[in-house]
Amino acid sequence: MNTTPQAEILNIGDELLIGQIVNTNAVWLAQELNKRGVAVQRMTTVGDREMDIVAALTHAMQHQDIIIITGGLGPTKDDLTKDILTRFFNTRLVFHEEVFQLLDSFFKKRGRVLNEANKTQCYVPEACTVLMNYWGTAPGMLFEKEGKIIVSLPGVPLEMKELMNKYIFPLIESRYTLPPLIHRSFLTEGIPESELMTILADWENNLPPSIKLAYLPSAGQVTLRLSTLNTDGKGKELILEQEEKLKAIIGHEIVGYDGETLEQVIQRIFIENKLTLGTAESCTGGYIAHKITSVPGSSAYFMGSVVSYHNRVKQEILQVKNETLQTVGAVSKETVIQMAENARKMLHTDYTIAVSGIAGPDGGTPEKPVGTVWVAWATPQGTLTKKYRFGNDRLTNIHRTYQAALGVLRKLVLNIPVGENFWE
C-alpha cells in the first residue's frame, strides 16, 4: 500500500484553449482529489494535436502516480484521445460487445438510431479496463502501467463525474493509504478579502501550526477554509476549537459551511421557518429567481417572480404608479418599494425582494451611473431599501445584485442587524 499519491489532470480540447468552454472539469477533479488526500501536482491543458497530447502524457507518466485525462473521446475526427492512447500503450482497438449493447439501448431509448460514427465508440484499446458509461455515449478507459493509474474520461462534466464516483475514487481509496485530511470551510458575504484579513489577523496569527488557512475570494464573497491532518485523531477537535473562535469574531457574516451556496442557505432557512418568498426583478431579468430555483426543493417556499423589465410591466402588473416612474424613474427607492410591496400582495408571500438598476454597459447618467441598483425587501415587519453602486460590467452587476439581495434577506429572517442605512 502506497501513501500520498501525486496526480496530474490532463484536459484535452482546442475549445478549452480558445476559451470557448470553461474548464470546470479541472476544478472539480482537483477539489475531489484533494478532499481524499491525493496531491494534485499539475494541471495541463492541450489542444487536439497528437504530439502535444503524447508529450503531456509522457511527462505525467514520469512524475505522477495518477493521471486523469478528460476529453477527446467523441465520434468526430478531432477526437484523438482513444487512438493516441492505443498507440501509446502499444495495444490495438477491439470491438466491445457490452459497450455496443449499452450504446444501442441508449440511442433506442431516445428514439434515435445508432449511426456508423457512434459505432466507432464501441472499439476500445485491448489493454484497458472499460468503464461503462451509463450517462453518455463514450466509455471511460482505465490503464495501469508501472504501478500508475491512467484514466481517460469523456469531457462532458456529468459523465466524467459519474465515472469518477463509480469507478476511480473507489479504486484510488483501495489502492492507497490516503492521509486523513480534514477540511472545514466558511462562506462569508459582503466583506472584501483585504478587510476580512485585517479583522482576522490576530486569530490567524495564533492558529496552531498544524492548521492551514486559505482565503478563497470570488465576486462579493470570500470562503475561508481550515485544513489539517487527522494523524493523531485530534484533527476534528482542533478545527472545531478554531471554528468557535472564528464565530466569535465574524459569526453573523458566516453565511454557509462546507460548500453551501447562498441560495441553498436561503432555502434551508425559509423551509425551517415555514416562510415563503417571491421576487420582482427588473435589471436582473429573473436571475435571482433562477438561482433560487436551481436548488432542488425550492418549490416548498418560493412562490414565483415577476420580471418587470419594461416600465409598462411595472405599471400594468406590479401597479407601480406612473407618477413615480415619471418623477424619480424606474431606478429609485420609491419604485422598488412599490414593486416589492405589490408583488408581496400579488404572490401572497411572507417576504419579497425587488430590484431595479442599470446593469450596463449603457443607460447610465451622471446621477445614476452604470452599476446603480436599488433593492427593496418587503417583510412582515415593513419594507427596507438600499442603493448599491457596483461596477461597470453587466454580468458582474447582475450577480452582485443577487448576492446583495439574498445576503440581506438571510439576516432579516434570522433577525441579524443589517444597519440603520437600510431603513430609508
Image (cartoon, rainbow, N blue to C red):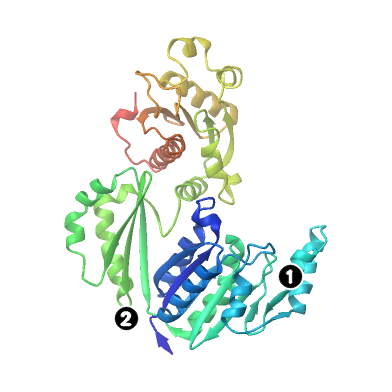
Circle 1 SS class: helix
Tell me the quadrant of the picture where the C terminus can be found: top left
Which quadrant of the structure image shows residue 408? top left
Residue located at (37% from left, 24% from top)? 369
Looking at the image, which is closer to me, 190 or 37? 37
Q: CA distance from mark 1 to mark 2?
A: 48 Å
Q: Position of residue 26 (x, y in %)?
A: 48, 63
Amino acid type indicated by mark 1: Thr
Which numbered disc covers residue 120? 1
Location of residue 216 (image quadrant): bottom left
Residue closer to the observer: 154 or 19: 19
Residue sitting at 29 percent across and 30 percent down?
420
**Relative image position of residue 340 (x, y in whole percent):** 49, 27
The quarter of the picture where residue 202 lies is bottom left
- Against 396, residue 381 (above or below) is above
Tell me whether the residue at label 1 lies in contact with that at label 2, contact meaning CB atoms closer than 8 angstroms. no
Disc 2 packing (10 Å; few <14; some 14–19; many ≥20): few
What amino acid is at disc 2? Thr
Left or right: residue 282 versus residue 241 is right
Which badge, 1 or 2, comes first in the chain's sequence? 1
Position of residue 103 measured from the top left corner of the image (x, y, whole percent): 76, 68
Indicate left or right for 106 with 342 as reference.
right
Compared to 129, does 103 lie above or below? above
Q: Which residue in the protein does label 2 denote?
A: 231
Q: Left or right? Give the position of 35 relative to 213.
A: right
